[in-house]
Amino acid sequence: MFIEEIFELDSLLDYEKQVSTTKEVNITNISYWNASSEYQEYMLKHIKFDYIPNIFNYKYTYDIPLDIRNQIIKKLTGYSDRKIMGLLTSSSSCSIVNMINFLKLNGFKKLCILTPAYFSVEQSCKIFNLSFEKKR
């Protein structure tokens, strides 16, 4: 299932750290979305804002340390089993898309959408070709 990628990323990041330490090489993550703190500071000094900018770093679930993810899962489920996985998302739409994908991958055939419902539920069903009906 797609969520297993997070475990693979943990292994990859551990290996990356090991290679970096043993070979004494700095490894650059070219998939990194965030600007460096130096660049952020530079931009804040050189751009005039009419407001106080809220610069924050993009967060992925896999950026949260494994022990913290496991603590969240244990708190929410009561279990600390490695087979249980949690996905933390930055928005309701991301949660809906992932849930519809999860349902489809786990053999669900049809979803009943109780209306009124957020628009992305229906759109996600269409994207993943999951049959649905709307009920009031």
Image (spheres, rainbow, N blue to C red):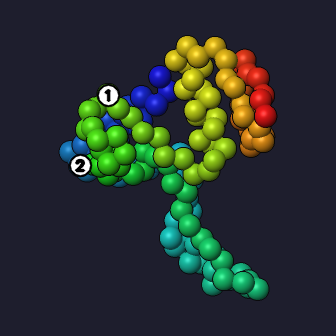
Looking at the rendered structure, the secondary structure element under dot 2 is helix
Numbered mark located on residue 83 in the image: 1
Mark 1 Cα-neighbour bin, 10 Å: few <14, some 14–19, many ≥20 = few
The location of residue 39, given as percent across then percent down, is 57, 71
Q: How many labels does the image show?
A: 2
Q: Which of 32 and 81 is in front in this view?
A: 81
Image check: 60 left or right of 136? left
The residue type indicated by label 2 comes to Thr
Q: In which quarter of the image is the C terminus?
A: top right
Taking the spot 52% from the left edge, 65% from the top edge, the residue there is: 36
> Depth-wise, is mark 1 or mark 2 nearer the camera?
1
Q: Residue furthest front?
A: 136
The residue type indicated by label 1 comes to Lys
> Could you tell me if residue 128 is visible in this image?
no
User: Image quadrant of residue 123?
Assistant: top right
Q: Which residue lies furthest to the left in this view?
A: 22
Tell me the distance, in whole angstroms, between the alpha carbons under discs 1 and 2: 30 Å
> Could you tell me if residue 108 is visible in this image?
yes
Comes first in the chain, label 1 or label 2: 2
Taking the spot 59% from the left edge, 78% from the top edge, the residue there is: 42
Q: Which residue was labeled with disc 2?
A: 21
The location of residue 47, given as percent across then percent down, is 71, 81
Image check: 68 left or right of 39? left
Mark 2 Cα-neighbour bin, 10 Å: few <14, some 14–19, many ≥20 = few
The location of residue 70, given as percent across then percent down, is 30, 44
Looking at the rendered structure, the secondary structure element under dot 1 is loop
Image check: 82 left or right of 58? left
Q: Nearer the viewer, residue 80 or 9?
A: 80
Taking the spot 23% from the left edge, 49% from the top edge, the residue there is: 21
